[in-house]
Image: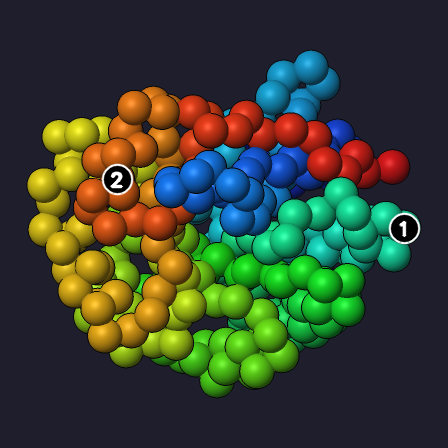
Amino acid sequence: MSELHDEFFSALDQGNWFLASQKIVSLADQSDYGAEILIRLFDGDRFLSNGKFFPGICRDERYPRITQQIVDLICEQLDTDASVFAERVFLNVTPTDFSNILTVEKLTELGQKFYQSGRDLVLELSEIFTPDELFACEETVEVFRKAGVIIGLDDYGAGVISAADIAAFPFDLVKSDRSLCGFEDAWDSPLHGELMHVSESKPLVLIAEGIEKVEQAAGLAALGYQYVQGYAFDQPTKLIQRN
């Protein structure tokens, strides 16, 4: 892989990272719906931006052990004090994760732990899934859903997964990308209407992400979104520090 990816894994192996949390809130009353877990990585005092390393790094064959370490850390925290977690906890997964047996086992255990604590795990399938990769993991996803895990699509509109794919796949939830929702001149994109059309016949939780202006809430609700995530509503805060 590239030197860029080597820099990421080098910093990860040094242990200079922690998990942060960002709330997802209702557009109707701004009550909490859940929170997404985010990895925050540093090289010395320098923050390594997720935007710089993702999504390409998610295809690296070493990537599943990142998810495994994140899951282990969350499991430890659940055993110690589950109260730090939201009612619904969102965690991003990739095709590389789903192709790794150990990672799938760990995610299954995590879902069970959240269920036992009275919380839901939401697995967000990254926009880097291709349609072929998406439908290849449908059997695994159905097992997760039967165990109470919520399945979502992350960053709709930024990748190649279409509204037709969403209609055909067992998604419970869809997050639309910042490029569709965070800029008012993108609100007339046909992708919004295509998603809303699917939601008329298939119950979906719909989230607009990357929102940086509170004033956009009414417009997003008018488009059909129920929830929102972004700096305008919550700044990511440290959740778990790796020892």
- Picture coordinates of residue 29 (x, y %)? 43, 39
Q: Secondary structure at mark 1?
A: helix
Q: Secondary structure at mark 2?
A: helix
Residue 119 placement (x, y as % from top left) = 68, 60
Counting every numbered tag in the picture gives 2
Q: Which residue is labeled 1 in the image?
A: 80
Going by the numbered disc 1, the residue's amino acid type is: Thr
Quarter location, residue 122: bottom right
Residue lying at the far top in this picture: please name it: 45
Residue shown at the point (54%, 77%) measured from the top left: 145
Name which of mark 2 and mark 1 comes first in the sequence: 1
How far is the residue under mark 2 from the one under mark 1?
38 Å
Looking at the image, is 223 positioned above or below residue 78?
above
Q: Amino acid at mark 2?
A: Leu
Q: Quadrant of residue 173?
A: bottom left
How many C-alpha atoms fall within 10 Å of the one at disc 2: few (<14), some, or many (≥20)? many
Residue 216 x/y as whole percent: 28, 29
Discs 2, 1 touching: Cβ within 8 Å: no
Q: Position of residue 184 (x, y in %)?
A: 18, 30
Does residue 15 appear in this view?
Answer: no
Q: Measuring 62% from the left and 79% from the top, which residue is drawn there?
A: 147
On screen, residue 129 versus residue 221, left or right, reads: right
Specify the label residue 220 is tagged with.
2
Regarding residue 137, the answer to whether it shows in the image is yes
65 or 37, which lies in front? 37
**Would you say 151 lies left or right of 170 here?**
right
Q: Quadrant of the C terminus?
A: top right
Q: Crowding at label 1, few (<14), some or many (≥20) Cα neighbours within 10 Å?
A: few
Residue 10 in the image: above or below residue 61? above
